[in-house]
Amino acid sequence: MYENLRNSKTAIFDAKVKPLFEELIGYGFGYSALANALNTKGIPTRWGQSWTIDSVRQTLKRLDLKTLQYSGE
């Protein structure tokens, strides 16, 4: 039951942020730039935290989106 609730909340969050991710990716933003842009706009992660490269990477994977990779990969 808890897993269904968590998945439902994640789906709602994903539906809200996906258009923003798609827009920023369209501008050529990579992981770091996405994290910076989302933090600057005051948009928290699904856990209410600041965005990091890892949280961006995990969200992109969940949303099945691709972007530029940062130079550390």
Image (tube, helix red, strand yellow):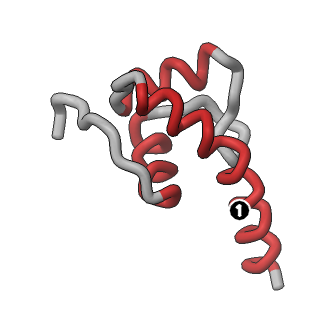
Q: Work out whether residue 45 or residue 63 is closer to the camera in this orientation and state it.
A: 63
Q: Quadrant of residue 48?
A: top right
In percent of width and height, residue 58 lies at 45, 52
**Residue, far bottom:** 1
Query: In the displayed structure, would residue 12 be above or below residue 73?
Result: below
Residue at 24% in and 37% down: 69
Q: Given the image, on which type of amino acid does mark 1 rest? A: Ala
Q: Which residue is mark 1?
A: 11
In this picture, residue 40 sits left or right of residue 8: left
In percent of width and height, residue 24 lies at 48, 27
Q: Work out whether residue 53 or residue 28 is closer to the camera in this orientation and state it.
A: 28
Q: Quadrant of the C terminus?
A: top left
Label 1: state its secondary structure. Answer: helix
Query: In the displayed structure, would residue 12 be above or below residue 70?
Result: below
In percent of width and height, residue 32 lies at 38, 25
Query: In the displayed structure, would residue 62 be above or below residue 1?
Result: above
